[in-house]
Amino acid sequence: MSRIAELLGCRYPVIQGAMGVICNPEMVAAVSEAGGFGVLGSAFQEDAEELRRQIKAVRALTDKPFGANLTVLNPHCTEMAEVMMDMGLKAVTTSAGNPGPLIELLKPQGVKVLHVCPSVDKAVKAQAVGVDAVIAEGAESGGIQGVEAVGTLVLVPAVCDAVEVPVVAAGGVADSRGFRAALALGAQGVQVGTRFIASTECIAHQSYKAMICDSSETDTFLVRRTEKILVRVLPTPLAMEVRRDPNRGEAIRRQDIGRAWIQGNLEVYTLAAGQDVGLVHEVKPVARIIEEMVAASAV
């Protein structure tokens, strides 16, 4: 069994990435029911009780293991962590910052921590502060990135060489070829985001899913949200504006993400997606996505 699958208690080492406000309980539960590891998102949440309600909703749909993501940049991150511990989650992913303080809070309660790392240096530092695994996320991935992103093909084996904890590959994994390639590079599992947006269980608006299915591998691009943060997005008119004028990106209100991602108002927020949109051509049930991804692979 994969070290990651053993660590998380799931059948397959396929972790669903945390994707803003569209990690709805139905999709998270579907991932876990299909043998993967579903993950709730808390990056845009301000109400820790809403996270508690979502955890209860997932548990009403599955008895399989699942977790949640803690985004260090969220000022309510500690409150979210306390809810996760109180609700008995056994594993979480952390991202966008130093996981050290969270590890000091979570590890004494027996919670496993997997930290998202965009570089070898960050992975080594994460291991030093006690993470149980690192998620090596390459430049192909959608969503938040730093200014010095490295491609998955280079990043994953470099991180595997540098750390002793298990490594998860993220960025550009959308099918069985990406899954097998990740294992060949030395990873013990994969984290998948964009492919799960185009699933029947995800609450992302149909226009979001359609744009993913209709886009090519060259359509996404990086836009600047702050001096240190870039985001890989789909080419909506708003994204094109932000590309031309970085100051436009800083004016986008984070509280409008749901209006765009769930309600389909593409004038108020950009749509995150990875370069693997070029490999996604239809909306499928989560179970089918995972079944096809791990087919004919030794896991």
Image (cartoon, rainbow, N blue to C red):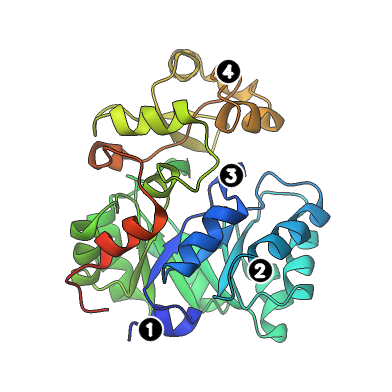
Verify CB contact (< 8 Å) between mark 1 and mark 2.
no
Q: Position of residue 76 (x, y in %)?
A: 78, 53
- Return the disc, 2 or 4, that comes first in the chain's sequence: 2
Verify CB contact (< 8 Å) between mark 3 and mark 2.
no
The three-letter amino acid code for the residue at tag 4 is Asn
- Return the disc, 3 or 4, that comes first in the chain's sequence: 3
Alpha-carbon span between mark 3 and mark 4: 22 Å
Find residue 173 and report its image quarter.
bottom left
The three-letter amino acid code for the residue at tag 1 is Arg
Mark 2, residue position: 59
Mark 3, residue position: 20
Label 4 crowd bin: few (<14), some (14–19), many (20+), radius 10 Å: some
User: Does dot 2 land on a helix, a strand or a loop?
Assistant: helix
Alpha-carbon span between mark 1 and mark 2: 24 Å
Which of 230/287 is in front? Answer: 287
Alpha-carbon span between mark 2 and mark 4: 42 Å
Mark 4, residue position: 247
Q: Is residue 111 left or right of residue 275?
A: right
| Vertical side of 69 occupied by 209: above or below | above
The three-letter amino acid code for the residue at tag 2 is Arg
The three-letter amino acid code for the residue at tag 3 is Gly
Which residue does the image show at 67% across and 27% down from the upper left? 256
Alpha-carbon span between mark 3 and mark 2: 20 Å
Mark 1, residue position: 3
User: Does dot 3 land on a helix, a strand or a loop?
Assistant: helix
Which residue does the image show at 57% across and 50% down from the upper left? 23
Label 1 crowd bin: few (<14), some (14–19), many (20+), radius 10 Å: some
Which residue does the image show at 68% across and 44% down from the upper left? 44
Q: Is residue 280 visible?
A: yes
Which residue does the image show at 32% across and 75% down from the upper left? 188
